[in-house]
Amino acid sequence: MNTFRRIQALRSHMARYELDACLLSSPENIQYMSGFQAITYSRPIFFLVNHTSACLIIPALEEDHADLTSTGVEQLRVYYEHPEKVSVAGSPLDHLKQLLSRGTRLGVEFSAITLRMADTLRALGCQLSDLSDTLKSMRYVKDSQELDCIREGGRLCRYAFEKTLEHARAGVSEMELEQYGTQALYELLGDDYPYSFSSPSCITPSGVERTIMPHVYSSCRRLARGDMVIHVRKPAINGYYAELERTFFIGRPSDPAKRAFCAMVEAQLAVFERVRPGVPAADLDRAGRDVLRKYGYGDYAIHRIGHGQGLGRHEEPYLSCQTDMVLQENMVFTVEPGIYIPGVGGFRHSDTIIVTKTGFENVTAFPRTLDELTFDR
């Protein structure tokens, strides 16, 4: 992790805006800046950076996990919950009282901090300034290590997807279908896998009623002939996500479903043609929607054409009609036009792409045509 470079960039921001320190509280930004990733943040975790030091405030159960040799942190401050030690090091607030003096000009994430925490910091005498946009702008162009993780995530997506589709047939349930690919992933990784792998999660809605809900969890519903299925794979490598989604059919689709599917594929290809540095992200959204409108599906394209990928499942850049973002080399995002038509079904492909000097690299390249994704078993 390039944590030293990132902390120095944050300190440059502090100097430019005359801040004394920055306090990070969101899991993704703490990981981005420090290299430390916890499974749960139900207990407060803070990363405090000033002009000379970087300190992680953590509960005792994360103390070994947050070893200084594996993160960009220079100092650990630990608090305890068990009565044998609860009085030894105090609470997270006690640590902050020791580290923040009255009048501290403090950068915080207005998008993540609670109102209660903001009031607490102001009661300590801190003057708060928002870091949210600064941290977003630091994260939406990826470095080489981040890109390597995302490429590896794409490779695992493709592998698991292929293994899943080998079992696409009537009679198998949504969750049963998923487990074929997930099991294959675990067998592939083996004993000496060099990355930290997490989130083998999927969703696999099927049928006319369930596929029109873009974010519905998988169920025990069994696939039937004529069903469309939207299968989603989203593994994380060292915390960095890649995403692959395909709509496929069990048996021959209806004519309305076939027409909608082909329009969706055409829309995704139209977006691909526009990807290169310097293009406004809103133009990509427009390119996809223009195709869908041409076929009369404009009212059914209810979400943006894509979203950024990284430590967040969804992050900048968002390919939306409401953004003023301009594409830069090494931005990473999905291209996923979706249409959801009551009585017909839902249709969405998603690929994760990296913006290159002249176009893009598709890290989840996978079959997308109707013939390739119709399974008549």
Image (spheres, rainbow, N blue to C red):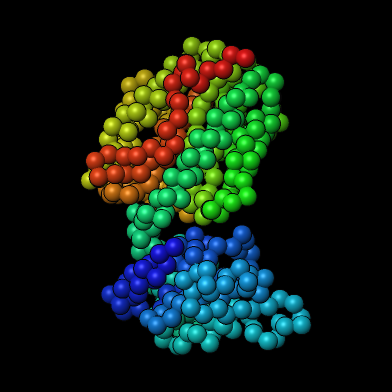
- Residue 306: image quadrant is top left
Q: How many marks?
A: 0
Residue placed most toward the observer, 1 or 242: 1
115, above or below 183, in the image: below
Residue placed most toward the observer, 85 or 44: 85
Rendered residue at 65%/22% (across/down): 223
67, above or below 276, in the image: below
Q: Residue furthest right?
A: 84
Residue placed most toward the observer, 18 or 234: 234
Rendered residue at 59%/45% (across/down): 189
Whether residue 272 can be seen here: yes
Whether residue 280 can be seen here: no
Rendered residue at 60%/24% (across/down): 166
Q: Where residue 138 sits: x, y (%)?
A: 35, 60
Q: Where residue 312 sits: x, y (%)?
A: 48, 52
**Which quadrant is home to the N terminus?**
bottom left
Residue 247 as seen in the image, left or right of residue 144: right
Rendered residue at 39%/44% (across/down): 333
